[in-house]
Image (tube, helix red, strand yellow):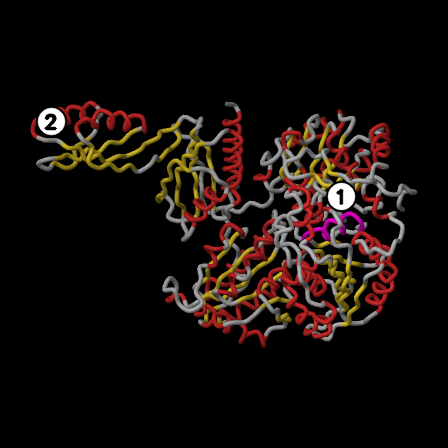
Amino acid sequence: MLNTFVVYVENKPGVLTRVASLFRRRAFNIDSLTVGRTEKPEVSRMTITVDADYDQARRIEANLYKLVNVLLVENITTVPAIVRDLAMIKVAATHEARSHVLELASVFRARVVDVAPESLIIEITGGEDKIDGLLEVLRPYGVLEMVRTGIVAMRRGNKSSVAISSSEEPARAAADADDDLSQSV
Amino acid sequence: MTKTGAQILWECLEREGVTHVFGYPGGAILPAYDALKYSKIHHVLVRHEQGATHMADGYARASGQTGVAVATSGPGATNMVTGIATAMLDSSPIVCITGQVGSKLIGSDAFQETDITGITLPITKHNYLVTRADELARTLREAFYVAASGRPGPVLVDITKDAQQSSCEFDWEAAKPQLPGYRPDLSPAPKEYEQALELIHNSKRPVILLGHGAIVSGAMREVRDFAERAGIPVALTLLGLGALPASHPLNLGMMGMHGEAWVNHTIQEADLLIALGMRFDDRVTGNLKTYAPNAKKIHVEIDPAEINKNVKVDVALVGDLREVLHVMLPKAESLDRSEWLDLIDRVKGDSAVRDIQNLPDSGHLYAAHVINDLWREARGSNTVVVTDVGQHQMWEAQYYKHEDPRSLITSGGLGTMGFALPAAIGAKVARPEAEVWVVVGDGGFQMTMCELATIVQENLKINIAIINNGFLGMVRQWQEFFYERNYQATPLLNPDFAKIAAAYGIRNATVTERSQVVPAVQSARQHEGPMLINFHVEQEDTVYPMVAAGAALHEMIRRPSPIVETAADE
């Protein structure tokens, strides 16, 4: 099954390579990986989706923790969470097709961000299924180009993904809490 | 106080307790070497950087202290790769210092530039590129801390030439490690202890599988107390040998591919495996599908990533072995397991090892004879045997009875030929009072024999026993069993090793008959300087028993015709 990990890492050169290298080295196949800044400048946040069974997912988590620069790993696969992907789709839209394409975009609550004589760029945010759905209905009109960011994810509710300060706060406690959740599945 | 990066390097090493480093100079590390003359640290000049890393590794394994290797950029650094991987696979704490081209040249393919942090990323516990002198002190403190704590391993610190040359304010106290994500100190939950103890108390046929972790953790006493109290026999991994004295009544011996038959049978018959500081390597489990089919499994291990990696366990206790056993000891009930122990004693008679040990002295020289005679001569003294990789390594493990931890140093996980000679140099430097024996094959010896010069230059008393069978013996054995005796590329045309030793001014002897073994060993032990003995042994001898790769642990290939059955060996 597809597992979603939220990984907090030190914002230092080379950390992305270390994480990517780990997945390569242990032959875990990354489905998607995104990385970006967080509310703390010294911390970066990755969302990684991997196809793995339960035992593999545990080992991925344990191996991520072995990287010195990894601060916290959460497997949020089974936790209520908001998961978002963003896509830009350039679709052929000649005069007669244009209104149909615009209609479809509005059904999917996608936005048109560029209009050219022969094409439109549609921007859509949402779960991967929703984007796949839009893509499916646009395909007959001619998808000229498409780019997706890969997913980012965040837990629902006020249980935030734990304070990752550079303080002494043991990140392990939070990880253990997460273990309980994933074990209950 | 203002210092150059080069001065800071040596001062930090001194503050970490480093007294010796093993290294080889070159352009990008020259500023550091220039500053060496102000340091109390003794620099051992090696002949190849691979040797430097094995020496640091041998130093660490012999003493428990972190070993240090130094090399220049480019080829100097890449030559370290094999030694770093060796230390990684066997959890040995070493710190490798490499020079790097100036920070402004990085990425330009400058002379002797190589991306050594990239190259060593998957084979180090952690690594660093330092481009500024003011990052050096904190980085080195972190490097030593990471290398030695938790599950130990190699750490590489790559220092640009300008970082060595430039100056900055040096304040050791202020340069504290900042490792917010590093958590080496894990301990099990109370519930997990209870589950483990319940399994142990309900078990009728338990076996302890003891590994390198016992030695790293310093848990020898706790292991012995626990085994005695709970009445549980102990099987050891190759790297665990010495963690429980071979003479201890509960010590079964080595398990696995070339383990004693009764040890493997015991494991297959067990109803509970208690794995202490070992990682279920494929060389000890055989085929996982048929491994200890009726046994529950408890895994005490410091590295959470090892849990359920190869063998799915029922209870995992993640933490330092010594601390875990401290908690378990008072709660362990002493139970009568005499039925189980008697059963093991009965199968113990079923030993392939004795076949060769009791061979009548027909004039043929067998490696087993050499090892066993060496053990008889050297036992009781403070001896460290450093082995290479191959048949001689397995014979050593079978016929040399190790009583003490850190008395056997060998490359287990990576199986690095060429390890023994340089690792022995490191061991001797770490423990000058110990008697150090290199037991090495004729193949592996030639991979790093340039380090004979290091022995001479450092005036080290090291004894070298070459088990010379004119073959890459273990590969030949696999060809014999699995490739229809197609001995491709395994016969060796060797130089006269005695003459090689003589060229270095090293005393030497050549032994071709069993009667000469003991006198040669005695001569080496009495001689003040190093000595090399070239043992010409039976060419096509085979290590028995053997679990073929992929076979079940109890399906051992045994010596074809047990020749003589005599009284049990002492």
Query: Callout 1: few (<14), some (14-19), or many (20+) C-alpha neighbours within 10 Å?
Result: many
Residue A165, given in percent of the width and then of the height, sits at: 45, 44
Residue holding disc 1: B544
- Residue B410, position in %: x, y? 69, 53
Mark 1 belongs to which amino acid? Answer: Tyr
Residue placed under numbered mark 2 in the picture = A97
Label 2 sits on what residue type?
Ala
Q: Nearer the viewer, residue B311 or B469?
A: B469
Splitting the image into 4 quarters, where does residue B166 fall?
Answer: bottom left
In the displayed structure image, the side of residue A97 where residue B274 appears, left or right: right
* Left/right of residue B470 with respect to residue A44 in the rendered view: right
Q: Name the spot of residue A95 as percent of width and height, x first.
A: 7, 29
| B398 within the magenta span | yes
Query: Nearest the camera: B298 or A139?
Result: A139
Q: Is residue A160 magenta?
A: no
x and y, in percent, of residue A6 in the image: 42, 37
